[in-house]
Every structure is written in C-alpha cells, then in structure tokens.
Image (spheres, coloured by chain):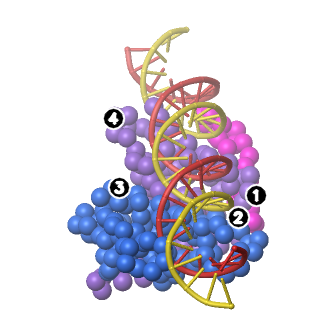
Chain colours: A purple, B blue, C yellow, D red
DNA sequence: GTCCTCTATATGCGGATTGTCAATAGATGG
DNA sequence: CCATCTATTGACAATCCGCATATAGAGGAC
C-alpha cells in the first residue's frame, strides 16, 4: 500500500491539494502543543482538522515533522516501551510555541482576507 | 527591475509567502467578473485583497492569467487603442463564473477549518 | 512455524507548482 | 538620446506533493 493506511487501496488517486501545508503544519504543531505524540497517531487525528486520510499521504506528515524538528520547533526521542515497532515521539519546544502563535496570527489574517473576498463576491 | 514595480529597487528581497495562490486566483477572477481588465492593472489592484506589491512578483499574476485562459475560464484580446505598450485585456467566460462560484465555496470551507483551528488553539 | 495483517517510520523519484529574476519593447519627458 | 514608466513574457531553480517502496516488530489464524 502507498503511504496511506487501512482500507482498500483501490484505484482512487489522491487529488493534488495546493497549499495544504498552510493548515497542516499549524495543525500538527497545535496537537503537539496539547500533548506529545508520534507521527502515526498524529496522522490519524488529522481528520479532526478536516484532513481525510484518503486525501493526504502519511509520508507528508512524517516529512513535515522532520522538517519542524530541523527548524528547532520540536524535538524527538524513541519510545521503546510501546508495543509494536518503535515510535518516534515528538514534543514541542519553546521556539515551537512561539512559531505556533505566529502561524495562528497569520491564519487569522488569511481568514480575514477570505472574508473580504467572499463579501465582495456577494455584493456582485 | 525584476517583475516588481516602481519604487526603489533596493536590496530588499521579496519574502516567500506560502499558499497565496489560494487567494490570488479567486481574487483575479473576481476582479474580472466585475470588469474586464489587463494584467498590469489587476496586479496594481491586488492591494485591495491584501497583496502588497513588495511581496508578490507581477510575473505570477501574468502566469495565472495565462493559465486561467488555458483552462477556458477567461479569454483575452489585444487592446491597441490604449497608450503605451499594448495591453492584453482579459474578460471572464461562463466557465469562469462557474469556477469562481466553486472557488468561493472552497474558500468558505477553508475559512471554517481555520476557524476551528483558531478556536482549538484558544482553548489551550 | 508460516503467512498475513496491522502498526510505524523512512526514502527516493518525478511531475507539478512556485518564486525570483532577466529580457523585451513601446511611450514619455527632459 | 537617455532614463524612466508601462506592460508582458520567458527562463531557471527551488519547493511541494503524490506515489511507490523498503524495513521491521507484534499478533492472530491455521
């Protein structure tokens, strides 16, 4: 199976989504701000943010986590006590909290711009 | 000067902005729904949608217009009556009106997702 | 035991999209 | 005729995303 998960692989291709990371990264960071976690479960819980597994490959999640680690926003360690394969657990760092705040502010401004656009559209 | 416009060229690099296309294309299409226009002026008027010239290269605008034309959303013709260099005027087509409506709906759902995220962030 | 499935992470490829910058060219003003 | 403003286009590099694939431990079926 591709990077995706359980369920029939089927011939349904994932559509290419533009600018997903705009919401994806803040979502991941927010989840890590709430509690430390590993990639597989974070991927699972992304549905709470409107990401359906069928339209998001898990490899993107793992890659983003590694990238955020390189940026010093989060750090990781191996959890060997858990069952099954080892898990790479992530926890947020101070720099991550700061960045999360910035991203939220940025999203607010995007939201406002979208609102303006919708308003202007409605007024024909 | 690069794709940018008037004002000192200066050594100030444009900052990389992510996911701006998400709003850019609907903005352009909405402006064309209001009145036919050419790229240079559309670029100018993007400030009304929160795009500052310093953070958006005009070449992106031209490229998006060509792309929307290839998709059959808009059409173009040369305006030779105007002063200065010839202008490629764009007008929206029916398919463009339809697509604009879809894009607006899509933006609404993105807005909702952003709202959810912000709400979850606030509740610590 | 052997096979299959589920959990869990990682990496490489290739095409699509994006950002930056340079080139072109007519018009205008000194 | 030289600099500047208007207006558009193309080239190149970097990034992004979907897909395929590799690895590997644990548990159940038989």
Chain at tag 2:
A
Measured as percent of width and height from the top left, residue A61 is found at 57, 49
Q: Label 4 to label 1, Cα distance in Å?
A: 39 Å
Quadrant location, the C terminus of chain A:
bottom left
* Badge 1 vs badge 3, beta-carbon distance below 8 Å: no
User: Which type of secondary structure does the marked residue at label 3 adopt?
Assistant: helix
In this figure, which residue is indicated by the disc labeled 4? A11
Name the front one of labels 1 and 3.
3
Q: Is residue B76 visible in this depiction of the protein?
A: yes
Residue B115, placed above or below residue A1: below
* Badge 1 vs badge 2, beta-carbon distance below 8 Å: yes
Q: Quadrant of residue B74?
A: bottom left
In this figure, which residue is indicated by the disc labeled 3? B70
Measured as percent of width and height from the top left, residue B49 is found at 48, 80
Measured as percent of width and height from the top left, residue B114 is found at 48, 70
Q: Is residue B116 visible in this depiction of the protein?
A: no
Q: Residue B80: which numbered mark, if any?
A: none
User: Which type of secondary structure does the marked residue at label 4 adopt?
Assistant: loop
Q: Label 1 to label 2, Cα distance in Å?
A: 7 Å
Chain at tag 4:
A
Residue A23, placed above or below residue B116: above
Q: Are marks 4 and 1 on the same chain?
A: yes
Q: Are marks 4 and 2 on the same chain?
A: yes
User: In the image, is residue A66 part of the stretch drawn in magenta?
Assistant: no
Q: Label 2 to label 3, Cα distance in Å?
A: 42 Å
User: Which type of secondary structure does the marked residue at label 1 adopt?
Assistant: loop
Q: Quadrant of residue A30?
A: bottom right
- Measuring 65% from the left and 73% from the top, which residue is drawn there? A102
* Badge 4 vs badge 2, beta-carbon distance below 8 Å: no
Q: Label 1 to label 3, Cα distance in Å?
A: 42 Å
Q: Label 4 to label 3, Cα distance in Å?
A: 28 Å
- Range of the magenta residues? A74-95
């Amino acid at each position: 199976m591709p990077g995706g998960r359980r369920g029939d692989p089927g011939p349904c291709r994932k559509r290419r989504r533009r600018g997903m990371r705009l919401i994806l990264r803040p979502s991941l960071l927010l989840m890590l701000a709430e509690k430390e976690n590993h990639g597989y479960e974070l991927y699972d819980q992304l549905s709470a943010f409107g990401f359906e597994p069928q339209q998001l490959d898990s490899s993107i999640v793992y890659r983003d986590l590694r990238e955020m680690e390189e940026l010093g926003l989060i750090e990781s360690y191996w959890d060997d006590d858990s069952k099954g394969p080892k898990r790479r657990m992530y926890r947020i760092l101070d720099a991550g909290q700061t960045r999360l705040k910035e991203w939220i502010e940025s999203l607010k401004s995007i939201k406002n711009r979208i609102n303006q656009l919708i308003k202007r559209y409605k007024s024909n």
